[in-house]
Amino acid sequence: MSRFTNHNFANQKALIRVDFNVPIKNGVITDDTRITSALPTLKKVLADGGSIVLMSHWGRPLKDIEKKPNLTLADFTLKPAADHLAKLLGIEVQFAADCIGDDAAAKAAALQPGQVLLLENLRYYKQEEKGDVEFAEKLSKYGDVYVNDAFGTAHRAHASTAVIAQFFPGDKKMFGLLMEGEVAAADKVMNDNKKPFVAIIGGAKVSDKILIIENLLEKATDIIIGGGMAYTFFKAEGGHIGNSLCEEDRLDMASALLKKAQEKGVCIHLPSDSILADKFAADATTSSSLSNEIPDGWMGLDIGLMAIDQFSHIISNAKTILWNGPMGVFEMEKFQHGTKAVAEAVCKATANGAFSLVGGGDSVAAVNKFNMADKVSYVSTGGGAMLEYFEGKELPGIAAINKG
């Protein structure tokens, strides 16, 4: 059993770092996934008879205000998150108008068992992102126990995610249930996977995914590559890609990755054909061709029917699946079929016993769009953090808890 599950929070204040960096338009939360993901952790503390002080960031207030002087800190308030959480929990959620200072200290000190307090946006202070020790120490005074449940920020060495842990003894700092689940799922894929292990890597740029592909060459049996990044590989091999997206400065690197994969016996699968568009627009005229024979004036915006069959077959045999990145411009209806078909293949393989992890903003958006999130084994909430984990990097937010 985990440290969190074993811990009894009765009459203790749990200082919990959550990731409530949710989309808010005109004061209304448009996607509450990150808030609902934290609920099991919060409910366990309250059920034990503990109280909760929540910390989170929202947006980049100081940087955005610098660019747009008409904005103020009030435009970045976490108050809508407090109101929304109150509805989800069915109890009052108190709100401190600052994350440090007299109001926050008084409200935290007065908390009774069963009560919840959300502090104002941590990023009102530059000390948060700088990992300032003094700032972290001030925050640490609000709780008896520190719980990090913000996997989405685990790759940042910020005051509230990494630095603060040093002010709590080993048995009083722990991961929350969301963070535990994220780490366990990622660890299962990278270190405890069953073969065949199929990694599906998509997105626009090879440069964004080089490190993850290199690390996966040590782990995966098959790597499927889709999205705009595939055309850099085709051009590197001497193919004709028309007006498709291509990172000209990464051609040598793409060739080197293909060669390295061959040496290691890892099969890299590129889409045999593509759905083409005469312009990057929802109303574009479409066509199709082999992916390495795209005519001038056309660009590949999705994988084609042969590629769908090719990829679906590979996925159907998988025992472990990692999916990071779409197969095309799935936001446009004409170019969503490849991503949807891959999502369906992943769900089918999962139903047949494969362990599947979907991570990265666009992949998560895709499975949510197609209502398939409950048909895969795990959907990660941490885009950048998950990517860095699969690149083999140590995440500061995880290391800070694991150190004792």
Image (cartoon, rainbow, N blue to C red):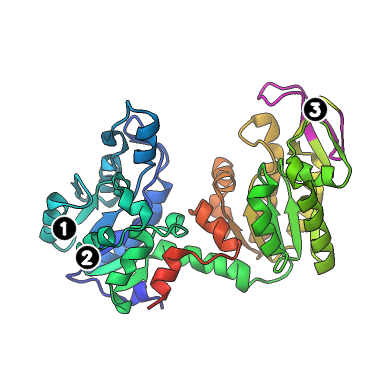
Nearer-N-terminus badge (2/3): 2
Whole-number angstrom distance, CA of label 2 to CA of label 1: 8 Å
Nearer-N-terminus badge (2/1): 1
Q: Give residue 393's mark.
A: none
Badge 3 amino acid: Trp
Badge 1 amino acid: Ala
The answer to the question of whether label 2 and label 1 lie on touching residues, with beta carbons closer than 8 A, is yes
Give x and y (percent) for residue 11: 17, 70
Q: How many marks?
A: 3
Mark 1 sits on what residue? 108
Local secondary structure at mark 3:
loop
The answer to the question of whether label 3 and label 1 lie on touching residues, with beta carbons closer than 8 A, is no
The answer to the question of whether label 2 and label 3 lie on touching residues, with beta carbons closer than 8 A, is no
Residue 341: image quadrant is: top right
Give x and y (percent) for residue 177: 40, 65
Local secondary structure at mark 2:
loop
Give x and y (percent) for residue 77: 28, 39
Local secondary structure at mark 1:
helix
Which quarter shows the N terminus? Answer: bottom left
Report if residue 378 is visible in the image.
no
Residue 102 sits above or below residue 142 on the image: above
Whole-number angstrom distance, CA of label 3 to CA of label 1: 60 Å
Q: Which residues are magenta?
A: 275-295
What residue is at 33 percent from the left and 28 percent from the top?
A: 69
Mark 2 sits on what residue? 143
- Front residue of 115 and 17: 17
- Front residue of 31 and 120: 120
